[in-house]
Image (cartoon, rainbow, N blue to C red):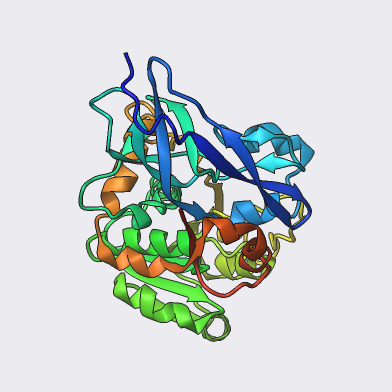
Amino acid sequence: MPIAANRENNAARALWIEGPRQAALRSARVGEPGAGEARIAMLWSGISRGTERLVFEGRVPESEAKSMRAPFQQGEFPFPVKYGYCAVGRVEAGPAAWLGRTVFCLHPHQSRFIVPLDMPRPVPENVPPRRATLAANMETALNALWDSGAGPGDKIVVIGAGVVGLLVAALCAGLPGADVTVVDIDPSRAKIAASFGAKFVAAADFAALGEEDADLVFHASASPQGLALALGCAGLEASVVEMSWYGDAAVAAPLGGAFHAKRLRLISSQVGQVSPSRRPRWNYARRLDKALELLADARFDALITEEVAFEDAPRELPRILAPGAAGLATGLRY
C-alpha cells in the first residue's frame, strides 16, 4: 500500500501554452497516488529552448504532432497544451522506499504530479537537482555520439554551441586523442567550450579558414548557414550528424558542390529512439540513468545561465524563448 505525506497539500499549478507566445499557470489537484505510483513535488524544471520554442510559437507540424507528444502532455498542438520534459523533484508520497528520493522525470512544468513508478529515475547523490535538469539534453548528446560512430583520435567539429552542442563537445573531448572544435556566432561560448577541452572558433573565422578535412561533424545550430558550414568542413567520406529540428520551416541544404564528390553521409539523430548501435542492449531507462550519471561534473553548471521562479514563468517565457535570446539553459525554480 502507498504511504502518503502532505495529504493536506495536494494542490498543483501547471504551465500551459495558451496561444502563440502566450503562457499561463493553471490550477490542478493531484490527489493521492495509487498502487505503483508516486507523487512528486517539483524542485526544478528545465526549459529546452529548441523544442519548446517551436511549441511556444505553434510551429509543430501536423504531420509530427503524434511523435512530438511529450510524456504526460495534456492538450493538443498547437494550443492549448501543457508541455515540457525536464522535471526534477522529490517524492513526497508513494511506497516507503521512494519517499524523500530526488528523481528526474519526463514531465511538463508542474509544481506537483503523480506518475507510475517506472517513469521517475533516481538522481545520483553527486548530481545536484538543479544540474539534473540537463538530463534530457545529455540523453540527446549521448544518443548522437552513438549515432555518429565517433572514435579516439578523430578530428571532430561541432557547429552550434547551444546546450546540446556543448554537451556533445564535452563527450567528444573525452575520447582519447580526439581533436574537438566548437564553432558558433557567439564568442561568449568560448570559455565553456575550453572548460570541456574543446577549441572554439567564431563562425566567421571558421568559414574563412576553409577547413574541409573533419572526420566527423555535428550540426546543432538549427540554421541553414550552420548546415552549410557543417557540410563544407567535412572531409572525404565523412559523416555529418544533423541534430537540429526545424519544425515547419523549410531549410535549404547545399547538397551541390562537393557533397557527392566527397561521398558525405548526412545522418539524422533524434533522441526518440535509442541509437541502433545500442538498441539490442540499451532501453530508455538505462540510457537516462547513464545521462544522469554523466552529469556528475560541476563544469556542466555553466550551461544553466539563468534561474526564474516558476510563478514568473508566464511573464518571462516570451523573453526566454525569443529568437536569439541570450544565455543557454534556463531553470525554473519551484
> Residue 121: image x %, image y %?
34, 36
Query: Is 140 situated above or below 226?
Result: above
Q: 218 left or right of 296?
A: right
Q: 102 left or right of 148?
A: left
Which quadrant of the view contains residue 326? bottom right
Q: 246 left or right of 12?
A: right
Query: Is 226 situated above or below 218?
Result: below
> Residue 89: image x %, image y %?
38, 43
> Residue 324: image x %, image y %?
64, 72
Residue depicted at x 52% and y 73% = 327
Dividing the image into 4 quarters, which one contains the N terminus? Answer: top left
Q: 153 left or right of 61?
A: left
Which quadrant of the view contains residue 208? bottom right
Which quadrant of the view contains residue 20? bottom right
- The residue nearer to you, when weighing 1 against 108, is 1
Give the tally of numbered discs.
0
Query: Is 84 situated above or below 279?
Result: below
Residue depicted at x 27% and y 30% = 98
Residue 258 appears in the picture as rendered: no
- The residue nearer to you, when weighing 159 against 51, is 51
